[in-house]
Amino acid sequence: MASVRSAAKPSARERLLAAANELFYAEGVQSVGIDRVIEHAGVAKASLYNTFGGKEQLVRAYLDIRQAGTADRITRAVAERDTPREQMLAVFESQGRQFDRPDFHGCAFIRTGAEANPGGLVQEAADAFRGWMRELFTRLAAEAGAADPGTLGHQLQLLYDGAGISALMDHDSTAAAASHAAAAALIAAATGASAEA
Amino acid sequence: MASVRSAAKPSARERLLAAANELFYAEGVQSVGIDRVIEHAGVAKASLYNTFGGKEQLVRAYLDIRQAGTADRITRAVAERDTPREQMLAVFESQGRQFDRPDFHGCAFIRTGAEANPGGLVQEAADAFRGWMRELFTRLAAEAGAADPGTLGHQLQLLYDGAGISALMDHDSTAAAASHAAAAALIAAATGASAEA
DNA sequence: ACTCCTTTGGACAGATCTGTCTACATTATG
DNA sequence: CATAATGTAGACAGATCTGTCCAAAGGAGT
């Protein structure tokens, strides 16, 4: 049948996804070939093509895994706070904690999607992730009583994306503090509240 | 000697740079092979290798061209305004005009640098561009009397990068308006002035 | 023990890409 | 005109990558 949960040997599918997640995220989808993935997963090449059908589908599955992980992490961080304002800021705090991880390599969706061919599975996954993120920010902005929740949600996403880019390309870990303070200021301006950091 | 300025036939170097700029920016550095570039430039393959030495150096030259163009455009937009506050906002207005161009494909440095191998010529070019941008924002922030020009400059760059990402990946041209309004709010908060749009 | 199904290991095809090399044409300049 | 520099056209090598195929091995359930 399916598998003995958390037993000794994960299935070929799970090992492939784990290897893809590590290698694709660390070195980039384009730079990592199929052979590296199957070698790192300890799996035969035919298993990959029987399970996923091709590299593009594996990349799609990798991005889905990453979206699930990121959504989980952010959802937990948000759930620990009480007010919508603090919940919005918690997203940036959770992102900032990622910047300090030694294996941080930026936003997988931006990195993979930036040079992906339009209309493919990669763009589908990127659209799904970005839509989820935008809706989260917009919902929280509405709950915080923003005059224009759509605009504030969009602005917070701009800061979120910009902080990820800066942390990746500038090796500047102060991006988290800068984006957090900027988010607080924008929230204050949009809700008419005070802007203490 | 060098060349008859603006005469009938540009040199092989100029044609290669023009072709690289068009193809690399439109389709991505990784997706476009050397053969496509030389065919589009109407140039022999040996000319490319005699002139630049290899693809990586051509990519580097392409990025230098783009930095020069972007810096020119932004410098002109800034020079048309009088106050530092308006000059900062002019950067976002100039960026927003790019979003409406039919050939807009995002920030070349983010797209090319996001999956580039570290320490290469591509990262050098990206660092140079991002450093120029950061210094511009920080200088204007200081001239505007911001309490912490470095932070405001960094925050404006986050917005700038985020807007470019959103325009590219979300096909959302309202990114320009959102980033412009957010920049105005951040400038107002950092300088203690009023925040009218 | 038998059967079914997954997995394995690797050879192989086909495509693509970077970079080299050779021989020839063009062009500008002394 | 002669010479030197520059550009052209394309074959070629070498590497790499995706995807296919096949015969053999292994494990689980009846």
Image (cartoon, coloured by chain):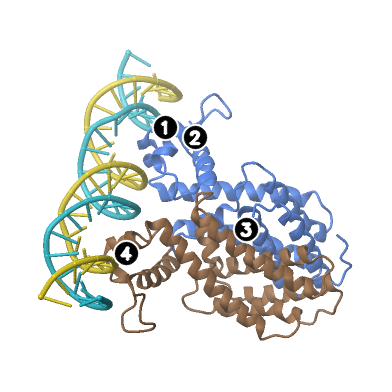
Chain colours: A brown, B blue, C yellow, D cyan
**Are tags 2 and 1 found on a single chain?**
yes
Chain that bears disc 2: B
Which residue is denoted by mark 1 in the rendering?
B43
Position in image of residue A20 (x %, y %): 40, 67
Location of the N terminus of chain A by quadrant is bottom left
| Front position in the image: A53 or A185 | A53
| Front position in the image: A25 or B19 | A25
Which residue is denoted by mark 2 in the rendering?
B15
Q: Earlier in the sequence, mark 3 or mark 2?
A: 2
Cα distance, mark 4 to mark 3?
Answer: 30 Å
Residue found at x 28% / y 60%: A46
Tell me the amino acid under the disc marked 2.
Answer: Arg
Q: Earlier in the sequence, mark 2 or mark 1?
A: 2
Cα distance, mark 1 to mark 3?
Answer: 34 Å
Which residue is denoted by mark 4 in the rendering?
A36
SS state under label 1: loop
Cα distance, mark 3 to mark 2?
Answer: 29 Å
SS state under label 3: helix
Which residue is denoted by mark 3 in the rendering?
B165
| Front position in the image: B55 or B142 | B55
Q: Earlier in the sequence, mark 1 or mark 3?
A: 1
SS state under label 2: helix
**Are tags 4 and 1 found on a single chain?**
no
Residue found at x 41% / y 61%: A58
Cα distance, mark 4 to mark 1?
Answer: 36 Å
Vertical relation: B45 (above or below) A125 = above
Estimate how packed mark 4 is, as few (under 14), some (14 to 19) or many (20 or more) residues with alpha carbons within 10 Å: some
Left or right: B29, with B185 as reference point: left
Position in image of residue B76 (x %, y %): 73, 47
